[in-house]
Image: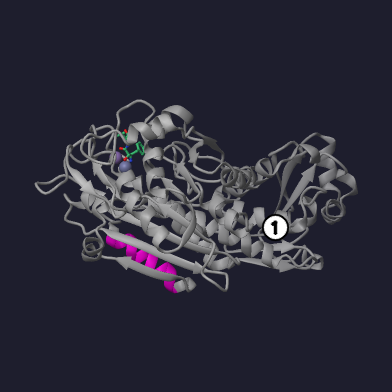
Amino acid sequence: MFTVKPKEQLFDSTQAIVIGLYHENRHQQKVYQEINSALGEVLDEYVKHGDLSNDYKAVTKVYTLGRIEPKRIYVLGLGKKKELTRSSYIKAIGHLAKELKKDRITQFSFVLDSFVSDQFSEEEVSTLFAEATLTAIYDFPNYKTNNSKPPFGFESISVITDKPIQKALDEGHAYADGINTARYLVQLPGNLLTATDLAHFAEHLAHDLGLGIEILEKEDLERLGMGALLAVNQGSVEPPKMIVLKYQGKEKWEDVLGLVGKGITFDTGGYSLKSKEGIVGMKSDMGGAASVLGAMEIIGRLKPKENVVAVIPSTDNMISGSAFKPDDVITSFSGKTIEVLNTDAEGRLALADAITYAKHHGASRLIDVATLTGGVIVALGDWITGAMTNDQEYYQSFEEITKWTDEPIWQLPYLPVYQEKVRGSELADLNNSPGRKAHPIMAGSFLAEFAENTPWIHLDIAGTSTSDKEYDLGPKGPTGVMVKSLAAYILKGQK
Ligand code: BES
Ligand code: MN
Ligand code: ZN
């Protein structure tokens, strides 16, 4: 996909050349001069008439009319060097990639020097370029029988530079693939992605990347007493799975980060049935699992010196004569008993057993990711992930990363008053739904009962896992949110 080519090959055969244009020093840019003179000063002519914009995100196409092999020059305006942030940079490149896609350009040369500044090194630009181009043009597969639009993908991208940046490109490529994997999984309908299918997917991933894998079958869950996950599965004809992936980057299996992802392949709400409006879209209730798998794909490829265990509880939440019901009392894997007040608060039940199991596998820190509550969408909308923690320092180290990855999170309070509510059951240790008030916090507080003393961060991605419109770095639909932050957190070796 990406090949590095020396500067002498700038005019070699591709469909297009892509250059960046900052506000500053336009004419000092060597590549600008080179292209300008090869094209008989046509760029200067554009500039003279105000047709070559260096405004942020402006894209100008210049036809080369046979003077050089590539048929077009794409000039991407980058604005003022000082004003460009990592976030705005990656969006600008995504925007450009979408333009190339519109024009069906499948091969092009990217002139790295023209994009570099004091703030953005060759390596950094290469990584974000690879990530942005491949995430921006992603298309979901569809099931149309007469699909008039053939699928689009870049075939070969030459990065023109004399610097050794292949590793940086590979890193961006891995990030993009992980993000797109999560998007792909979330988009799959519930009938085409059951817990069994998700387990198969994880097995393939583990096989391809050399990760450790363990799949607990229904009998295993029964033997181990994972009564919370089993309760959610009780009304289904599809068997549940507890999916475990392991990546060992340190000599010893210690200091292990546990990633726990909600893998509900379809959430009807159970007997606390969702409305006919609320139920549509519930195929995406395995978004947390998808984010964890996407992050594991990146980790498996880039091989950091860290230990990670991923645990995904998976089932659908269905209705039948055998389904669990409100008022049922169940016993979780931890031994804690739970009074079920709402079968639609199923995610926290499945996650409870997964969190306990992650600790059994040696997790000394935890992050859970889940499309957990509609309430978080009401509170924070669809661009900010709701978060909770039982360890402020740990939380801050992760929050720092989310600023870099531009996946904003916002902390919700975790306080004794909320603990009291989730512990407020006359019959059991806990109840799974104390009511409408503060329900995103109640869900997190419930999970905290299972994290116990292990440092824990909770990420509620109900709002952020899908986008209702197209954006610079992707299409409308599943976003793959948190793939990047989870992977970056591990790769940057944060504690
Ligand atoms: N999967 C839903 C949360 C959800 C809602 C995700 C909308 C994406 C979009 C979750 O299992 C659920 O049903 N939560 C309930 C909790 C309530 C019963 C306390 C909710 O948010 O209404
Ligand atoms: Mn639910
Ligand atoms: Zn759910």
Q: Residue furthest left?
A: 321
Decide which of 36, 365 is in the foreground and name it: 365
Q: Which residue is mark 1?
A: 126
Give the answer, above or below, for where 36 lies relative to 442.
Answer: below
Read off the magenta span.
196-207
Please name the predominant secondary structure of the magenta segment in the image: helix
Give the answer, above or below, for where 214 lies relative to 18.
Answer: below
From the top left corner, tell me how far across and down residue 328 is, in percent: 17, 42
From the top left corner, tell me how far across and down residue 73 is, in percent: 72, 51
From the top left corner, tell me how far across and down residue 291 is, in percent: 46, 52
Task: For ligand 1, tell me if the residue under mark 1 lies within 8 Å.
Answer: no
Screen quadrant of the C terminus: bottom right
Secondary structure, mark 1, is helix
* 71 left or right of 462 in image: right
Q: Decide if residue 151 is in sight here.
A: no
Screen quadrant of the N terminus: bottom right
Residue at horizontal 43 percent and vertical 32 percent from the top: 416
* 443 left or right of 133 in image: left
The residue carrying pointer 1 sits among few (fewer than 14), some (14 to 19) or many (20 or more) residues within 10 Å by Cα, namely: many
Split into quadrants, the picture shows ligand 2 in the one at: top left
The amino acid pointed to by label 1 is Ser
181 drawn magenta = no
Q: Residue furthest top?
A: 437
205 drawn magenta = yes
